[in-house]
Image (cartoon, rainbow, N blue to C red):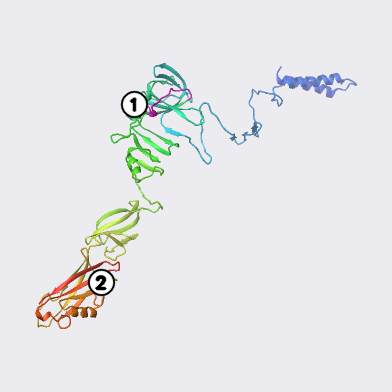
């Protein structure tokens, strides 16, 4: 009898009791039989029970959601969301969208290469194993190739959290069976000098390939060592690192103990506790270097000979996309721009738009006489001694010399007369030009045929002094 038929029978029974008009017809036996029939139906009815384990063979719709478990850690919401403490997936999980709330943690080493999970192992021969890999979905097939080097690690489940590794070389691949026959590497060929047998449920990754160069590269993130590591040319379990060859193509993070950085670490140029970036080659459209405070480091840019029409900078070049300090050659000196931008500003001594890098210390002083350098005794004459200050090849003007101290001194065989003359010509009193007159500026010994010298001393505010002497003879 179907559920509908049973319900109709019960409805007819209770309707007859309700509509009965005969006196004393609804006896206790009649009413009790109806209730007993109802109880029998409820005992066998396919409804979910609250007092014992139950099963519903039909679609169950919980329109307001559900809370599962005594502690309520699992809840199903009408909006389609599920909240629970943890999810364990023995097979594969497919997500249309995966969102990590606040943080995602990867423990140990995370490899970006071919990988598989061992379903079962069979020891077929000396050092050979037939590995069957787990299918994570119906069309899943192993991607390992012949001669691939496989690495697997197994947790020893001890308090020290140690693990053991096993290294295998793929001899053949059975794609249909999702299996491979592998040879176990000898202990001496493995890091640490030991190798262990593969076990079921272990994850294996392609470490490299013994023959195929296109499969000899891999990279991984190691939370244990604190770096991203890029390897190439890996054709055996143990890595090479010497002056002839190295499998270490690059790293990001804490430097490994490799030849490329070992000398820098020993000399203190870099620290193993500070992160760095190392690659055999780097291509970049932009490269901006900063100091430890975050200030940009300007790259020197040689612009050749200075041009009055060119714009020079010390700052960010939008076209070249970098920070540059322009440098030019001018007047026998090498200059660097010291302002954000300048144009038409000639590099010269005391020009704050430029800093002299080479030639700035090549200061010199020269003296010429406007009337020659030989005069006869007994005649009246006069001349101007003109001093010139040069910075390399550039003649400086008095305004460029600025606050420099200028002193003229007379030198002759009349020492007392020289002292008196020097007192009358104190420092800075006559500038760079000295007028010499035979009647007032010559020593008493001039008529006897002696010579007289005049020296100019130019002293700059930084204490640097430069001098020149001019001798007048008769």
Give the vertical position of 335 relative to 84 (above or below): below
Up the image or down, 385 lies above or below 31; here it is below
Bounds of the magenta segment: 190-201
Pick the residue in front: 42 or 421.
Answer: 421
| Mark 2 neighbour density, 10 Å: few (under 14) some (14–19) many (20 or more) | few
Numbered label attached to residue 210: 1
Instruction: Check disc 2 and report the residue beneath it.
Output: 398
Against 282, residue 315 (above or below) is: below
**Compared with residue 103, is residue 430 higher up or lower down, i.e. above or below?**
below
The spot of residue 386 in percent (x, y) is: 19, 74
Alpha carbon separation for disc pair 1 and 2:
78 Å
Which residue does the image show at 39% across and 54% down from the upper left?
Answer: 295
Task: Determine the residue located farthest toward the right in the rendered image.
Answer: 23
Is residue 440 or residue 174 the one in the foreground? 440
Task: Locate residue 409 relative to residue 231 in the image: left or right.
Answer: left
Q: Considering the numbered disc 1 on the image, is that residue within a helix, a strand or a loop?
A: loop
> Which type of secondary structure does the marked residue at label 2 adopt?
helix
Q: Give the crowd class for mark 1: few <14, some 14-19, many >=20 residues within 10 Å.
A: some
Q: Which mark is residue 219?
A: none
On screen, residue 97 versus residue 196, left or right, reads right
Residue 31 locus on image (x, y percent): 84, 21
Residue 374 lies in the magenta-colored region: no
Q: Earlier in the sequence, mark 1 or mark 2?
A: 1
Residue 283 appears in the figure = no
């Amino acid at each position: 009898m179907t559920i509908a038929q049973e319900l109709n029978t019960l409805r007819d029974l209770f309707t007859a009791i309700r509509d009965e008009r005969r006196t004393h017809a609804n006896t206790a036996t009649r009413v009790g039989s109806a209730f007993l029939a109802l109880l029998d139906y409820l005992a066998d009815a396919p409804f979910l029970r609250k007092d014992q384990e139950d099963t519903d063979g039909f679609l169950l719709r919980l329109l307001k959601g559900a809370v599962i478990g005594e502690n309520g850690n699992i809840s199903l919401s009408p909006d389609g969301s599920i909240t629970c403490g943890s999810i364990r997936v023995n097979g594969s999980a497919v997500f249309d969208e995966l969102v990590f709330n606040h943080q995602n943690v990867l423990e140990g080493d995370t490899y970006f290469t071919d990988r598989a999970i061992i379903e079962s192992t069979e020891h077929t021969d000396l050092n050979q194993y037939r590995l069957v890999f787990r299918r994570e979905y119906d069309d899943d097939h192993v991607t390992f190739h012949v001669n691939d080097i496989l690495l697997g690690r197994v947790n020893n489940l001890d308090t020290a959290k140690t693990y053991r590794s096993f290294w295998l070389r793929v001899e053949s691949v059975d794609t249909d069976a999702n299996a491979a026959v592998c040879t176990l590497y000898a202990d001496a060929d493995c890091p640490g000098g030991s190798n262990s047998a593969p076990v079921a449920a272990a994850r294996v990754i392609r470490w490299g390939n013994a023959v195929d160069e296109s499969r000899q590269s891999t990279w991984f993130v190691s939370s244990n060592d604190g770096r991203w590591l890029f390897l190439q040319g890996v054709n055996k379990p143990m890595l090479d690192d010497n002056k002839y060859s190295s499998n270490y193509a690059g790293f990001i993070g804490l430097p490994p103990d490799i030849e490329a950085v070992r000398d820098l670490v020993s000399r203190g140029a870099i620290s193993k506790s500070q992160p760095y970036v190392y690659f055999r080659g780097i291509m970049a459209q932009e490269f901006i270097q900063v100091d430890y405070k975050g200030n940009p480091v300007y790259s020197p840019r040689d612009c050749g000979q200075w041009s009055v029409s060119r714009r020079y900078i010390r700052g960010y070049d939008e076209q070249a996309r970098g920070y540059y300090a322009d440098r030019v050659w001018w007047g026998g000196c090498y200059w660097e721009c010291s302002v954000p931008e300048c144009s038409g500003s000639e590099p010269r001594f005391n020009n704050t738009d430029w800093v002299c890098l080479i030639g700035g210390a090549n200061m010199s002083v020269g003296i010429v006489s406007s009337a020659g350098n030989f005069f006869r005794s007994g005649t009246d004459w006069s001349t101007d001694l003109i001093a010139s200050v040069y910075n390399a090849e550039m003649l400086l003007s008095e305004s460029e010399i600025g606050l420099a101290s200028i002193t003229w001194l007379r030198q002759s065989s009349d020492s007392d007369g020289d002292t008196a003359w020097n007192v009358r010509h104190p420092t800075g009193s006559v500038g760079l030009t000295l007028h010499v007159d035979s009647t007032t500026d010559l020593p008493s010994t001039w008529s006897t045929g002696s010579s007289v010298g005049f020296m100019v001393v130019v002293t700059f505010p930084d204490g640097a002094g430069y001098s020149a002497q001019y001798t007048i003879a008769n």
